Amino acid sequence: MSLDAAMPRAKAPAILPGSGGLRGALSDLFWRKPKVLLLLMLLPPVLWLGIVYIGSLFALLAQSFFSIDEFSGLINRQFTLKTYGDLFQAANLDIILRTVTMAALVTLASAVIAFPIAYYAARYARGRWKALFYLGIMLPLWSSYLVKIYAWKLILAKEGILTWLLAKLHLLWVLDAWLSLPIVGGNSLSVSFTGTFIVFVYVWLPFMILPVQAALERVPGNLVEASSDLGASPGQTFRNVLFPLALPGIVAGSIFTFSLTLGDYIIPQIIGTSRLFIGQAVYSQQGTAGNIPLAAAFTVVPIVIMGFYLWGAKRMGAFDAL
Amino acid sequence: MRSDGSQSAPLGLKIAATCGLLFLHLPILLIFVYAFTTEEKSFVWPPPGLTTQWFAVTWNRPDVWQALSLSVRVAAISTAIALVLGTLCSAAVSRTKFFGRETISLLVILPIALPGIITGIALRSAFSLADIPFSFWTIVLGHATFCVVVVYNNAVARFRRTSGSMIEASMDLGADGFQTFRHVVLPNIATALLAGGMLAFALSFDEVIVTTFTAGQQQTLPIWMLEELIRPRQRPVTNVVAMVVMLVTLLPILAAYYLTRDGDQIAGSGK
């Protein structure tokens, strides 16, 4: 080979000796058989998540096929579908329907409020403003969940800032009229479905903004300009160009808002009426009632609903927007 | 000449975006005002007077300190476990293509993708089936499980940006696997791990839903807070704790943001 002749002869051996010892042997083994290293790297996390998490999910599923002995209150560890029979009583179906309706409304409202913020951040904010917008969405997302709920308890209380503000604006009659409505009203906002709804929207809103913004970042600006050059009104541009392109992002965000609302039991407990949501039903069944099988069967409901939801979302291409 | 992206937004959009951001931030600011109120019995606005006495009262409350110490210990150990598991998993997934790689990613993300109550009740029923009594470690078990994903996301994003040829170069120059990890891989992913660790800490420090199922009689700070929300005992103390919790969780988020902002994927975009 001509290359060989051109190269100066090196004094060092072509192959270095192994560094020796256990450490060297291990290092050589990992180099020669990368699969061993891969296996060793994967083993701890897979064991942890597999045993602790997947194991627990199976335990949960198993529990839902057990039943509770009504007289002794003990759990009868034998396969039965009786617990699922109990689940489909009218009262429980009411709870499921109420939760799903709330989740749908919260998702819709979050999408409406999130869109302008996401659109502004994606298309108009630049440089310093972009960073500010990013932090402006990230800080509420990560700040303490309970403190956020507490803040709304302060706001919605009868003697709180919202009533004060409305009184200053001479708009108290609007609040009173709203509170006197059947279902959505109540004694004060902090014990009504309206209050629950507002807090849900507030707490999950950042989860909607981020994927919508990610989807809108990918829309080229000249597409919007082309649409208006071709004579579309801003409304038409929104309906025919922006909205269809943002839809995967909205669906991706709705996975969070929907799933989180389905499973939450703390918000309706602190701000809301005494009528239960799925999460509260699960919590009270496993806690005070000690009926873990029924609680387990109840949690299967959001899992099944989310399963269908994710399947639908995947068909709409929402996962590419995540 | 309009495609340079510098044209200003329509007025309606500006107003809607501003209102949205105000909606997100004003309630949090309110917490800072209420921590100084002189009112004890109600949430009256405007505050009848301002005082700092409740900070001293809170400082002398042993139950607050106990809850805080439990929360910090749980968060520290969960973060440590999550750092190890998350780094291993992300290294395996981003270095090699193997059968079942997608399944591993799904497995890591699942604990945070399913509602917290499912994770909580699942762990609770597993403890009940296996007759494991509630303890400090049952809380850590739950927290570490959902903290892995935060470290994993940050580390995977960083691995994607570091080139594999550096590792090969290091090995070619005679370093063994351990030296390469210590001197080449670790410095590259250090800030991503730090950011992931801080986010994991914040996530664990604030977690309440899973904790209510795995804590038994012990009180972490969020559980203490939840008790106060359901059955208020001394409202001003709750106000002060709320403000402190807010500050404690905001600092790691800001730090994580500044550590990773130069990258293509900034920490914290997936909670």
Image: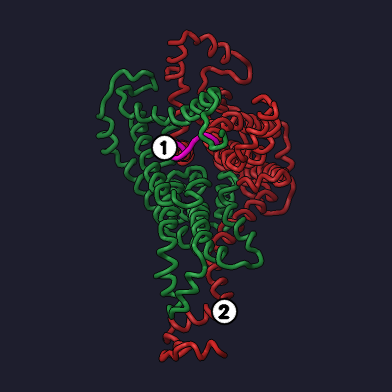
Chain colours: A red, B green
User: Bounds of the magenta span?
Assistant: A123-130
Q: Residues within 10 Å of mark 1 (few under 14, many from 20)?
A: many
Q: Secondary structure at mark 1?
A: helix
Work out whether residue B114 can be spotted.
yes
Q: Is residue A253 above or below residue B85?
A: above
Q: Element at badge 2?
A: loop
Which residue in the structure is indicated by mark 1? B225
Q: Are marks 2 and 1 on the same chain?
A: no
Front-most of residues B157 and B216: B157
Residue at 27%, 38% in the rendered image: B59
Q: Main secondary structure of the magenta part?
A: helix
Q: Amino acid at mark 2?
A: Lys
Q: Which mark is residue A33?
A: 2
Residue drawn 72% across and 53% down? Answer: A79
Q: Position of residue A273 (x, y in %)?
A: 56, 25
In-image side of B48 versus A264 (left or right): left
